[in-house]
Image (cartoon, rainbow, N blue to C red):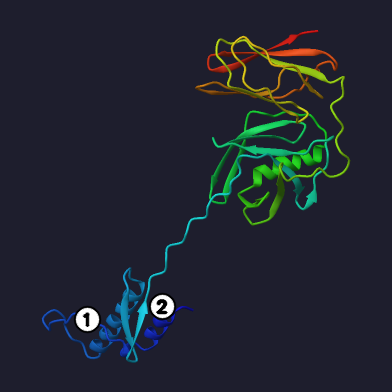
Amino acid sequence: MDDAERAFRDALHRVDSVKIPVPSLEPAEVKRTPGLGLVLGRWLAAAAVVAVVAGLGTWALTVRGQPVTAVPAAPPTAAAPAKLTGTTWIAVEFHGKPTVFAPDKMPFLEFRTDSTFTGADPCNVIGGTYRLIGSEITITRSGVSTLIGCNPTQQQTFAKVLEDTRRVYRDGDSIELVDQPGNVLARFRSSEAYTTPGPTPTAVPTAAVEIRIRNASSVDFTDVYAVFPSGEKVHYGPLRAGSMSEYTPVKQAYSYTYLKVTTARESYVYQPIDYVGESALVSGRHYSYALDLVDSQVDLKLEFDE
């Protein structure tokens, strides 16, 4: 209990000893009733004590002849939001249990400064928006609803974690996603500090699918970024109008995939709805994703190169 609280307590217990000027009341203004004067006096004195202690300024009270200073409490400081952008967050625990390979990728999230996020579970690409105020966060999935099952139980858990998350806390290279009652739903590690448990993933085999990007538009692309169904992320970099990137080997690809294309003025996202019924591209062959901008959207056409 601080000095102001002790002053408030003592003042209420010893109202008669508090010396606070109270405006006089003329007899014409108050009709006296026997005993009412004492009650009214005590009530006014107590009200004055409450007003003084709760006031915005600094007031001096006299309690048993000793001055006590009541200082208003400082306003609460708003919590600074956790910094989530600038790294890839790898899921290491769901409900206290370690996550598992599927087959050699982990579920991940990437938060962007425009309040959007992307990730994978890891066999299905996910994306949507988030709202962060202090430590409070709401994550909303949208667009992607792929159904590739590499660890169905864990994939469903990941989706439920994102749905139930209400707060996020960062401690160095780690974050925790917490639900409304305060239960820790998941823990993530920054990709810069993450060490893959278990066997080291093998290199991409030479028989992988080779994918490149062709800028079929009349606008220069300042950046092209792809996320494939296996969870592999490929940064194709800038592409001038009419130019093509180098081929990049990926373990699994379909006739389309998640793409983010930026120009000098806009950013465009191509988000698949699902891959149900689609056949995977043949390993060991070369393909191009021809990208054009039509009506403010990315138009993708698959080209078989060899």
Image location (x, y in percent) of residue 37: 23, 87
Tell me the number on the disc at residue 22. 1
Please say whether residue 175 is visible from this viewpoint.
no
Q: Residues within 10 Å of mark 1 (few under 14, many from 20)?
A: few
* Residue lying at 76% horizontally and 22% vertically, measured from the top left: 276
* Residue lying at 68% horizontally and 22% vertically, measured from the top left: 236
Is 82 located above or below residue 6 in the figure? above
Q: What whole-number distance in Å separates the C-alpha atoms at marks 1 and 2?
A: 22 Å
Nearer-the-camera pick, 248 or 288:
248
The residue under label 2 is: 4
Image location (x, y in percent) of residue 84: 61, 44
Is 105 located above or below residue 42 in the figure? above
Image location (x, y in percent) of residue 154: 79, 41
Under circle 2, the secondary element is helix
Nearer-the-camera pick, 294 or 221:
221
* Residue lying at 41% horizontally and 78% vertically, measured from the top left: 4
Does the residue at mark 1 contact the one at mark 2 (Cβ under 8 Å)? no
* Residue lying at 70% horizontally and 22% vertically, measured from the top left: 257
Q: Residue 35 appears in which quarter of the rendering? A: bottom left
Residue type for callout 2 = Ala
Mark 1 or mark 2, which has the lower sequence index? 2
Residue type for callout 1 = Val
Image location (x, y in percent) of residue 16: 31, 90
Task: Tell me the quadrant of the picture where the C terminus can be found.
Answer: top right
Nearer-the-camera pick, 272 or 231:
231
Nearer-the-camera pick, 266 or 297:
266
Under circle 1, the secondary element is loop
Q: Residue 260 appears in which quarter of the rendering? A: top right
Q: Residue 283 appears in which quarter of the rendering? A: top right
Is 165 located above or below residue 57 in the figure? above
